Amino acid sequence: MKIGAQAAVLTALILGLVTFVGGNKTVAVAIDGQSQSVSTRAATVADVLKDSQIEVSSLDAVSPALETAVADGASIDIKRNKTVQVSIDGVDRVVHTTGLTVADVLEQLDVESDAAIAQRPALELADLSTAIDISTPKVVTIKVDGDTKNLDTTAATVADVLAEAKVKLGKDDELSVKPAAEVTENQKIKVTRVENKKVKETEPIAHGTKTVKDAKALEGTKKTVTKGVDGERTLTYAVTLRNGKEADKELVSEKVTTKPVEEEISIGTKAKPKPKAATKAPGSVSATWKALAKCESGGNWSINSGNGYYGGLQFSASSWAGAGGTKYAALPHQATAAEQVATAEKLRKSGGWGHWPACSSKLGLR
């Protein structure tokens, strides 16, 4: 009986050992891609992790689920939760992810494929030193040089947008927004071309006039001694053009390039000689002389017929001068009727009415 009891105990021990050895399992546990082999008798994933002193949080991803039964040779994949700083269009946020690379975060956030990413998508999150910088496409309008440009851009700043649109700014050009400003959706950017330049213009300088007295010239007479000439000055302006149109103009300097020449006029101061007393002409004209003038000139005492004869009685210039008519006027028709008759009386006394042959005969004067 004693031997039988010992045999029974031995048999139980052997069976227990077989059962213990038979229940042991080898499980592969991978944490963020780093795998390790775990020997365990645990029945579930949770028990395996507990026995292996592997702690997981509610934000970690464990596959298969914690309550899943574990068989020998099973694999458990754990992706640790990570806190990642992300900047989307300048707005900072914190993202919790179990991904391993920047691409995993982009996929989790459903970022557009044409968005601009500062980091390489393949970069592992463990190697990140800065926030993931994401810039989504935005519609921007640029007004420049009389044209309007519409762009879909992922540029971060206004300066970057202008560079993308190949818009170069001059040193004086103006922007409606600051170059460093962040780009926003439907942003409008206006470029004002500003040009500052120096412009030279000329204008005349009017000459002056001075008078001098001339004692040798008669009173009332004037003579130009020196002809006046206008001068010229050059004006320099600082001009500002805005989009090609003059916006401001300021005089900065002026210089006389040609001096004016003053005009000099002499004025006579010599007293005029007193005029000789005019010879008084006879008073009235008799009917006889009127009739003779009517016959000779139609009674027109001021006629210049153009045939060498003048006045109402048709004197020739020589007969007028010979009879002394020039004391009245240079030619007969310039004298009065009475002066012409007075001169004609002198002719009649020396030669009778024959000086007027046709008309005197017609009138019965001879």
Image (cartoon, rainbow, N blue to C red):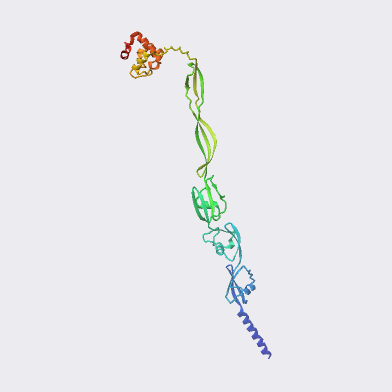
Question: In the figure, residue 287 lies in which quadrant?
Answer: top left
Q: Is residue 353 left or right of residue 151?
A: left
The image quarter containing residue 79 is: bottom right
Q: Position of residue 275 (x, y in %)?
A: 46, 13
Marks counted in the figure total 0
Point out residue 40 in the picture as x, y percentages from the top left corner: 62, 75
Q: Quadrant of residue 74?
A: bottom right
**Residue 146, above or below 303:** below
Residue at (64%, 73%) from the top-left corner? 50
Residue drawn at the location 49% of the way across and 21% of the way down:
265
The residue sitting at the bottom extreme is: 1
Rendering coords of residue 329 (x, y %)? 40, 15
At x 61%, y 79%, the residue is 23
Question: In this view of the protein, which residue sits in the foreground, 329 or 202?
Answer: 329
The residue nearer to you, when weighing 365 against 46, is: 365
Which residue is outermost to the top? 350
Q: What is the quadrant of the C terminus in the image? A: top left
In this picture, residue 62 sits left or right of residue 329: right
**Residue furthest to the right:** 2
Rendered-image quadrant of the N terminus: bottom right
Percent across and percent down for residue 318 are 35, 13
Of 136 and 342, which appears nearest the observer? Answer: 342
